[in-house]
Amino acid sequence: MLIRRTKKSELKESDLTPESVYKSRREILKKLGIVTAGLPFAAQSQAGIFDIFGGDDKKSESSAIFQRSPIVAPKNNAYGTGIELTPETKVLNYNNFYEFGTGKGDPVENSQNFKVDPWKLEVTGLVNNPITLGYEDLLKRFPLEERLYRMRCVEAWSMNIPWIGFSLAALLKEADPLGSAKYVAFETLYDPDQMPGQRSQFVGGGIDYPYVEGLRLDEAMHPLTMLSVGLYGQTLAPQNGAPVRLVVPWKYGFKGIKSVVKIHLLEAQPPTTWNLLARHEYGFFANVNPQVDHPRWSQSSERFIGEGSIFSSRRKPTAMFNGYGEEVASLYSGMDLRANY
Ligand code: MTE
């Protein structure tokens, strides 16, 4: 077993704080200014951008700190080098994972007892060779590599993250899609015992769980599309979607479904969680596009979350396809990207 969970009472302070990340989460959250007032989902849709994914400062009674394990993975520089990385502390403490609460600090607070081993990821549907991967398979069956990707959230903030994982195409090729397969549907674990947001509509932001996402098959097969099992040289933390999550760097962050248990190939376009919640605000494609504003805010620029306080982060212009146009624009040639937002 690669991940060990230990009771907080059994740990020394130094054990709790690898690289100071967890040294004082509460302090960090306060410094980051991400302890905000909560709103139920219905109220959020009336609110401004900082309230939309804002949450309250309710802290869980979590009695353990999730232990991540080191992963050795060669760097793949083909997709970008030299970008300023977001500090690991912020990647670990500023999250959207509504199954653990809607506040940016809720996922880290509420997910530390999350069980990722054993895990079962099924690839089913229109394939010749259905596959089920266990926890160890995720880490060993496909050659892992590190890629530095930009991540642009639909809320107009962004991070640059060193992900570890493999191209989803490698897995889909093994499953061997049938000619009739046109789309790929993804599903997050449904386990209300572990996920407080799935137990309570209020905690979970009004989402009808499990969280579901989808891609067109050609998008899913694109080499940039990654299944990630780690970041910053270690296995994923639960708040980032352990043990395995999707990363599609030219799309808004909500396409990056976390803690995936099912990948299903099908002929028709599958439903997706945010589109089901607010169809006119969140489309199926969700390609990063500075020319197509969200109905309630501009998408032309973003707050880059780097060093320093979250709210003093510098703004920068948003790039078409989040800067990956050279690689992916051809997937959408001839398509009206305003209609297909
Ligand atoms: N996956 C699930 N299952 N539940 C969620 O609430 N939030 C999405 C996405 N994946 C979400 C999810 C959103 S809105 C974003 S921006 C990213 O995860 C955030 O990923 P991060 O917290 O690792 O930065």
Image (cartoon, rainbow, N blue to C red):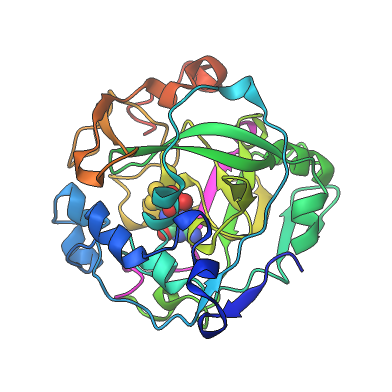
Determine whether, in the image, residue 186 is placed left or right of residue 74.
left
Q: Is residue 263 magenta?
A: no
Provide residue 203's location: percent of width, then percent of height. Answer: 33, 74
Provide residue 341's location: percent of width, then percent of height. Answer: 36, 34
- In this rendering, the answer to whether 332 lies above or below 280 is above
In the image, 7 versus 179, the foreground residue is 7
- Residue range in magenta is 202-219
Q: Is residue 208 magenta?
A: yes
In the image, 270 versus 282, the foreground residue is 282
**Quarter of the image with the N terminus in it:** bottom right
Determine whether, in the image, residue 146 is placed left or right of residue 63.
right
Provide residue 270's location: percent of width, then percent of height. Answer: 54, 50
In the image, 208 versus 25, the foreground residue is 25
Image quarter of residue 73:
top right
Provide residue 39's location: percent of width, then percent of height. Answer: 19, 67
Determine whether, in the image, residue 142 is placed left or right of residue 37.
right
